[in-house]
Amino acid sequence: IAGITQAPTSQILAAGRRMTLRCTQDMRHNAMYWYRQDLGLGLRLIHYSNTAGTTGKGEVPDGYSVSRANTDDFPLTLASAVPSQTSVYFCASSEGGSSGANVLTFGAGSRLTVL
Amino acid sequence: GQNIDQPTEMTATEGAIVQINCTYQTSGFNGLFWYQQHAGEAPTFLSYNVLDGLEEKGRFSSFLSRSKGYSYLLLKELQMKDSASYLCAVMDSNYQLIWGAGTKLIIKP
């Protein structure tokens, strides 16, 4: 089934630890995104990639890094986790381009708790 | 600043009609999206409006007025499975999506 796979589904992490959330898509979409979703707030963009080899900062990039070595994979790394990074993280992809009809397909999410 | 406003929570009865409103103030406009998100699941695409007017898709319709910075999602013949959060998002002049906090819709039998 075509779509986006995220791992892990959930994780409890000690503050200060390094963590990588994995995201893989098989739709050959150009653009990929990482969002965090917190209660009472809209989805907030962390980082994005318009095409393989390029990345950009979103609304809340501090404390996170990404890479896009190929079309399919877009891992998100927390170098030194802090409790404020406790959230649900969604990876998404789209065909991209400068078109308003840029529909996102989301992964199932990764629930991260930092203690 | 950029802002998307939608009600936090709404309650409706099975079989009825409900309208979820969304108002926005953004730097430019390149379309408005509605997504549905069931509890504990990923958002899924419902509709896209870029021109004024009503777009109908089965039981769901979405309306846009660009001059008023306003949209609504209309759900007809409500079913229990429609209980979910509905997210409004606007694509700004830089083709970045600005998201509302979502409206939690509770359907009662």
Image: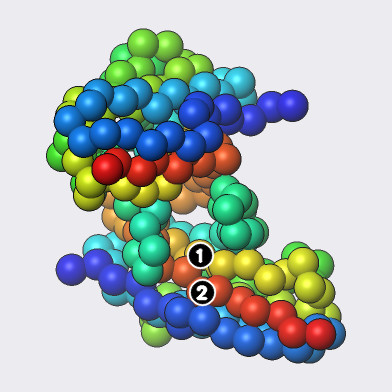
Q: Nearer the viewer, residue A44 or A55?
A: A44
Q: Few, some or many C-alpha atoms within 10 Å of disc 1 (few <14, some 14-19, many ≥20)?
A: many
Q: Nearer the viewer, residue B38 or B17?
A: B38
For residue B87, the mark is: 1
Residue kind at label 2, given as amino acid type:
Thr
Residue at the image position 58 percent from the left and 30 percent from the top: A4
Question: Residue B76: x and y, percent?
Answer: 77, 80
Residue kind at label 1, given as amino acid type:
Leu
Residue at the image position 30 percent from the left and 19 percent from the top: A67
For residue B103, the mark is: 2
Question: Residue A71: x and y, percent?
Answer: 46, 16
Q: Chain of mark 1?
A: B
Q: Quadrant of residue B29?
A: bottom left
Let me know if marks 1 and 2 both belong to one chain. yes
Residue at the image position 25 percent from the left and 24 percent from the top: A18
Question: Residue A52: x and y, percent?
Answer: 38, 17
* Kind of element beneath mark 1: strand
